[in-house]
């Protein structure tokens, strides 16, 4: 076996690739990448059975740093690309990664509609409450009053609450993680991928360069783990989930807050009863073709 | 515009044919009546071709559906008009004057009337009183006046009633025997009433019925069927006229045909869903019109960069912006050419006929997959929404499917390499493309520019040499595409005095104009382009350099194709014939303008008398509650408006009393003044 082959083998086993992440030292996204690798390595899931799709932004670069099929698509468009790929081959495990600007700003329309559809997708949003790659402008999750490059007098727009939005819009698995809590994050990603339906995992992933407010220590002082403090809570309960989603102040819950079972879009699409589209025959049989022609006469 | 009016010539009919028109309000069931008649025609072995001029209103707007019925396959809906079935007063006023000598206007005299002064010489207006004709049949729905009129029409057009009865039996099968019986009775009553009362108005025509039933398709449904035969597996769309019935047809046949259809939240989602599916390895397509295509713009370059096949159909309507949602235009060529930033390979092709809409779908799906790039199909409302009889045998279920370099296993040549080179530099520019989920070919497709492996070169790894080679690799594919496409060819004698040049949907109407010109003694040929990018520069120039007078005919206001032709060949055509009023060309418009170009007459853009009437109708609708109609029109050059004006007498629709005069500018078309008489 040549050195090249063994490199490949190593990559496929560890999900390491030759390209190193281009994030700033200390970026929360490193934690998310580590957790994602951990959650998907040495599982039944082989690298070629997994498809990662991202948009544009610092966190969207993640797809290039892990060994799996991937599409680094357009800003805000990861979810539709993922939708198309999943519908084409629903045997693939499709994970979407991106940031708050990508998903909750330019891509929010797709975010809402993807959740309504409840496709079996896992969406990990690295939420740093700022536009990082474009050097520090306010994002859809920037807190009110937060001074950024584009809000010098403090942000006056109400931030989006992605969790409440997800719970009320059709996502069937809603969780929040924190890059500073890697063990929990890994578990959330594992559960999200295992969940059959649309899973949103919003992850606090601090931007060490452009967000000097929502730092690791800011989050550490506030977050508490739901599984520790409220182990007996009913996470299928809509009201409970909404209450937890709205809790954002001196204490912020992290963990899985909502999970229900519902048929996925793929389950209800009759064309997919015959297996993945990608394996189905192409073209049309003569009998059906003739029938379609004569039907018009 | 002058081209519609001046020197209007009607060529003698070369074959047995008549054109009938159904005029009425949207919601009057005009399209259903047209479809019923078309079925009769198709079953008898005749050919039908329709043109539906309608408005973007579900109810209350005005609709005019023309059906050209012929013993042969016609290339366009023509410019004859023999029988008008008028369902409302508006259709009488607007269209009765267009009926040709020896033609007939049929109207329900219980509801409307026909002023003899509207008619050309030897045109008969015949009253068909619904209440009397159907007396004793019980309570009938008002819409059944259409069935009665169809019966009467068949009599005057010398077409047997029996086939209509069979068609009605099929159409109303789901509603039960009683409804079928009632419809047949009403049709018979209309037929018999005409037989007793309209004998002298009967059209002198006798048909040869071959009784070989033929399919009846629109460009949109043909394109959908062609795509299915061509291996389409996923179709995504957002509703938009005039592309929506591709979506409707595919939804209806989705399960049987094994095509997954996804309606999405907007066109940005639509095109990205199609690209996601194409990336994963299934044939995907999406369709829209210009406004939706504008939203898809960024993704056109995305598909090219990811080297992912996708077919995007733009069924063009009048632009810009919301423009004319229910009117046709060839105005989006520039948009297709310029969609998305940067240089990248894209293919643009334009369907030249309804029949061709079937073929172009399969071709586009093949080219997209063979060369891993976006293919844009340009169709338009005229092709897309209008139905016509398809010559049996024109289409086959057995469409050749070429998947190019799509693979499921690692090619031997790549096995011992350092990872999978998705964007391997090759002499064709085309690289092996795995079905996603295949083992051993894991890679990332990125919209950032990248190297052979897919690793980004955009930021920290930027490398000018790699950037140059990957750019050239992508563009190289255009050479391969060009070789796959049939070059343009001259139709008609090589030494003609004039060459009519067109692209896309105007092929048929230009063809008929060519016939008219030839009959009028003009030596003319036709050069038509279906493939617009990449362009057959060499082949086109070889032909063009031998042509004498060259005229580009297209349905837009700036001559987008004439400009494209100049850009690709350096060849400037002698003249253009352009139309941008929302309605398609009729052959005589092209014939007449060609003649005036040959006799060096300049283009006259002054408002014609007919256009002055149209402007008046618009004014009457908006400001005068539809209560008046224009009668007399005179031109007056001495007035206070610094331009000659048309002065139109407007009378009360019911009483005929003169109510006032409307002044319309001959140059500007402005409605200068409404002078209401007290």
Image (spheres, grey):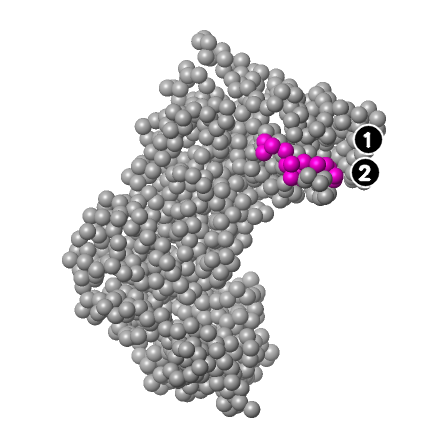
Left or right: B368, with A129 as reference point: left
Q: Quadrant of residue A135?
A: top right
**Mark 2, residues whose alpha carbon is within 10 Å: few (<14), some, or many (≥20)?**
few
Residue A265 pos. (x, y %)? 62, 40
Q: Which of the image's four quarters has the C terminus of chain B? A: bottom right
Q: Residue at x 20, y 48 (%)?
A: B542
Q: Residue at x 15, y 58 (%)?
A: B495
Which residue is the site of mark 1? A251
Question: Does residue A60 appear anywhere in the picture?
Answer: yes
Tell me, yes or no, whether the highlighted magenta stretch contains residue B327: no
Badge 2 sits on which subunit?
A
Q: Residue at x 65, y 39 (%)?
A: A150
Q: Which residues are magenta?
A: A133-150
Residue B562 pos. (x, y %)? 31, 54
Tell me, yes or no, whether the highlighted magenta stretch contains residue A145: yes
Which residue is the site of mark 2? A243
Left or right: A223, with B229 as reference point: right
Q: Quadrant of residue A185?
A: top right
Closer to us: B8 or A30 = A30
Closer to us: B340 or B643 = B643
Q: CA distance from mark 2 to mark 1?
A: 13 Å
Question: Does residue B157 appear anywhere in the picture?
Answer: no
Name the N-terminal-most of marks 2 and 1: 2
């Amino acid at each position: 076996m040549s050195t090249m082959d063994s490199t490949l083998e190593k990559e496929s086993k560890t999900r390491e690739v030759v390209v190193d992440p281009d994030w700033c030292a200390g970026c929360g996204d490193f934690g998310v990448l580590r957790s994602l690798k951990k959650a998907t390595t040495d599982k039944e899931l082989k690298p070629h059975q997994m498809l990662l799709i991202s948009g544009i932004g610092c966190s969207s670069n993640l797809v290039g740093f892990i060994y799996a099929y991937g599409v680094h698509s357009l800003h805000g468009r990861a979810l539709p690309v993922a939708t198309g790929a999943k519908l084409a081959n629903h045997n693939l495990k499709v994970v979407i990664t991106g940031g708050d600007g990508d998903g909750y700003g330019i891509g929010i329309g797709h975010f809402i509609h993807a959740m309504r559809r409840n496709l079996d997708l896992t969406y990990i949003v690295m939420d740093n409450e700022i536009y990082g790659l474009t050097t520090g402008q306010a994002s859809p999750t920037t807190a009110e009053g937060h001074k950024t490059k584009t809000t010098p007098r403090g942000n006056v727009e109400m931030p989006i609450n992605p969790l409440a939005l997800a719970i009320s819009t059709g996502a069937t698995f809603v969780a929040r993680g924190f890059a500073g809590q890697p063990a929990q994050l890994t578990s959330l990603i594992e559960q999200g991928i295992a969940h059959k339906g649309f899973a949103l995992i919003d992850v606090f992933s601090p931007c060490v360069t452009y967000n000097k407010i929502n730092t690791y220590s800011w989050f550490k002082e506030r977050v508490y783990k739901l599984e520790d403090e409220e182990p007996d809570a009913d996470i299928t309960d809509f009201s409970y989930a909404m209450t937890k989603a709205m809790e954002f102040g001196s204490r912020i819950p992290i963990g899985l807050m909502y999970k229900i079972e519902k048929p996925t879009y793929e389950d209800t699409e009759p064309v997919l009863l015959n297996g993945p589209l990608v394996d189905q025959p192409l073209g049309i049989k003569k009998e059906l073709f003739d029938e379609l022609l004569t039907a018009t006469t | 515009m002058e081209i519609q009016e001046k020197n209007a010539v009607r060529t003698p009919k070369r074959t047995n044919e008549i054109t009938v028109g159904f005029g009425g309000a949207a919601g009057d069931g005009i399209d259903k009546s047209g479809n019923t008649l078309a079925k009769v025609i198709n079953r008898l072995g005749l050919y039908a071709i329709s043109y539906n001029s309608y408005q973007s209103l579900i109810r209350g707007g005005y609709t005019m559906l023309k059906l050209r019925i012929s013993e042969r396959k016609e290339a366009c809906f023509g410019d004859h008009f023999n029988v008008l079935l008028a369902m409302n007063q508006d259709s009488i006023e607007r269209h009765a004057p267009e009926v040709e000598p020896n033609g007939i206007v049929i109207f329900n005299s219980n509801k409307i009337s026909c002023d003899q002064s509207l008619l050309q010489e030897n045109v008969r207006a015949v009253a068909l009183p619904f209440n009397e004709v159907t007396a004793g049949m019980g309570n009938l729905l008002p819409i059944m006046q259409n069935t009665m009129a169809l019966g009467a029409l068949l009599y005057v057009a010398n077409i047997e009633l029996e086939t209509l009865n069979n068609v009605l039996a099929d159409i109303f099968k789901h509603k039960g025997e009683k409804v079928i019986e009632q419809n047949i009775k009403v049709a018979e009553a209309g037929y018999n009433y005409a037989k007793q009362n309209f004998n002298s108005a009967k059209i002198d025509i006798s048909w040869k019925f071959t009784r070989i039933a033929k399919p009846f398709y629109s460009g949109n449904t043909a394109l959908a069927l062609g795509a299915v035969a061509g291996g389409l597996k996923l179709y995504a769309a957002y509703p938009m006229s005039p592309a929506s019935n591709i979506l409707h047809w595919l939804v209806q046949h989705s399960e049987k045909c094994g095509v997954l259809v996804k309606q999405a939240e907007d066109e940005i989602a639509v095109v990205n869903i199609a690209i996601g599916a194409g990336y994963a390895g299934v044939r995907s397509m999406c369709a829209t019109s210009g406004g939706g295509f504008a939203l898809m713009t960024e993704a056109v370059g995305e598909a090219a960069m990811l080297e992912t096949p996708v077919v995007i159909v733009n069924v063009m309507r009048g632009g810009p912006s919301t423009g004319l949602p229910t009117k046709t235009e060839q105005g989006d060529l520039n948009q297709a050419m310029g969609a998305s930033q940067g240089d990248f390979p894209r293919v643009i092709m334009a369907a030249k006929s309804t029949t061709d809409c079937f073929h172009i779908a399969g071709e586009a799906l093949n080219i997209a997959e063979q060369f891993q790039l976006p293919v844009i199909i340009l169709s338009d409302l005229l092709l897309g929404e209008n139905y016509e009889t398809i010559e049996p045998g024109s289409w086959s279920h057995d469409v050749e499917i070429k998947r190019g370099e799509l693979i499921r296993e690692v090619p031997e040549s790549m096995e011992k390499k350092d990872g999978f080179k998705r964007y391997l530099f090759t002499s064709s520019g085309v690289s092996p493309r795995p079905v996603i989920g295949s083992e051993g070919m894991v890679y990332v497709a990125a919209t950032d520019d990248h190297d052979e492996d897919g690793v980004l070169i955009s930021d920290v790894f930027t490398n000018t040499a790699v950037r140059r080679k990957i750019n050239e690799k992508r563009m190289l594919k255009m050479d391969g595409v060009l070789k796959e496409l049939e070059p343009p060819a001259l139709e008609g004698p090589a030494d003609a005095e004039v060459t009519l040049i067109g692209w896309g949907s105007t092929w048929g109407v230009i063809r008929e104009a060519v016939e008219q010109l030839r009959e009028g003694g003009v030596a003319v040929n036709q050069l038509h382009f279906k493939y617009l990018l990449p362009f057959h520069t060499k082949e086109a120039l070889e032909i063009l350099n031998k042509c004498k007078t060259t005229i580009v005919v297209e349905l837009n206001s700036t001559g987008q194709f004439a400009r494209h032709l100049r850009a690709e060949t350096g060849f400037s055509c002698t003249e253009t014939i352009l139309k941008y009023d929302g309605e398609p060309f009729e052959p005589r418009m092209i014939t007449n303008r060609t003649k005036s170009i040959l006799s060096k007459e300049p283009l006259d853009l002054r408002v014609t008398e007919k256009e002055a009437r149209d402007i008046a109708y618009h004014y009457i609708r908006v400001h005068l509650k539809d209560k008046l109609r224009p009668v007399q029109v005179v031109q007056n050059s001495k007035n206070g408006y610094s331009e000659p004006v048309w002065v139109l007498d407007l009378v009360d629709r019911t009483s005929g009393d003169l109510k006032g005069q409307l002044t319309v500018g001959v140059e500007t078309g402005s409605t200068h003044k409404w002078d209401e008489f007290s």
